[in-house]
Image (cartoon, helix red, strand yellow):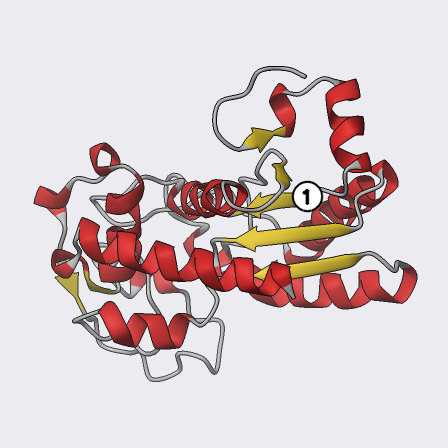
Amino acid sequence: MSKSVGPMEAKYLTRPDLTALIKKGLIAILPIGSLEQHGPHLPLGTDTLLAEYLSKEVAKKAEAVIFPSLFYGYSWVWKELEGTVTLTQDTLKKVVTESVESLIRMGFKKILLINGHDSNKMALKYIIRDLSESHDEQVLNIFYPEMSRIYAKYMESPTWNGIFHAEEFETSLMLAMDESLVKMDLAVKEYPEVPPFYGYDESSLAYVSKTGVYGDATKATKEKGEAMIREFVEKILDLLNK
């Protein structure tokens, strides 16, 4: 087999290598994220980078092959801002569905979608429902399992109107993943006023916040991020074991 460092990634494997792993019954992991603004202190690829990081942490303890990430998601609310590449819901559903069907044709019986972008959740929910109508293979869609409990356990700051973006939670996770990618000297706290029609019309987040941060990024620490990652990984492994 090809030499690999850490978790096995499909992009580094040969076809015979992959065939052997499929026959062994390994799980396929597909990280899914987005490319969009994350305030003045986090990289555009935060959601995808975190999905990849979580996937690799899971694959260290589970027999799995990680496939290349889907870097673009449904990012309509940021579409007018520099750095955003967005797909429509229909395009996202088509890309993910056809990607999963490709994994099924290869012979994978269990496929894990690890999503790092909140706005992808709706499309992914319906994707796995639709796939279940025509395929017997098990497809799991995971977005930070038991997040409400874990958020309440470790976070010192509240969400903005139930939404988190580039604040304490995501910044802590990024610090745990790679401190060099986080510009903590630029981290800010912002809780903008909620527009009166927000949630009732097409109001976009892009122009509600001045900084692109929804919450308090200044409260983030590497230690919080590491603790949360451990809990997320344990929960995902528990689901896989079941």
Q: Position of residue 107 (x, y in %)?
A: 85, 41
> Which residue shows up at 73% across the image and 22% down it?
17
Q: Is disc 1 placed on a helix, strand or loop?
A: strand
Q: Residue at x 21, y 32 (%)?
A: 180
Query: Relative to residue 106, is residue 46 drawn left or right?
Result: left
Q: Nearer the viewer, residue 98 or 65?
A: 65
Q: Is residue 189 above or below residue 11?
A: below
Q: Amino acid at mark 1?
A: Ala
x and y percentages locating residue 231 in the rendered image: 38, 62
* Residue 103 location, quadrant: top right
Residue that carries the numbered disc 1 in the rendered image: 28
The quadrant holding residue 126 is bottom right
Q: Residue at x 48, y 64 (%)?
A: 235
Which residue is nearer to you in this view: 92 or 126? 126
Q: Residue 237 at what x, y percent from top left?
A: 54, 58
As drawn, is 47 to the left or to the right of 21? left
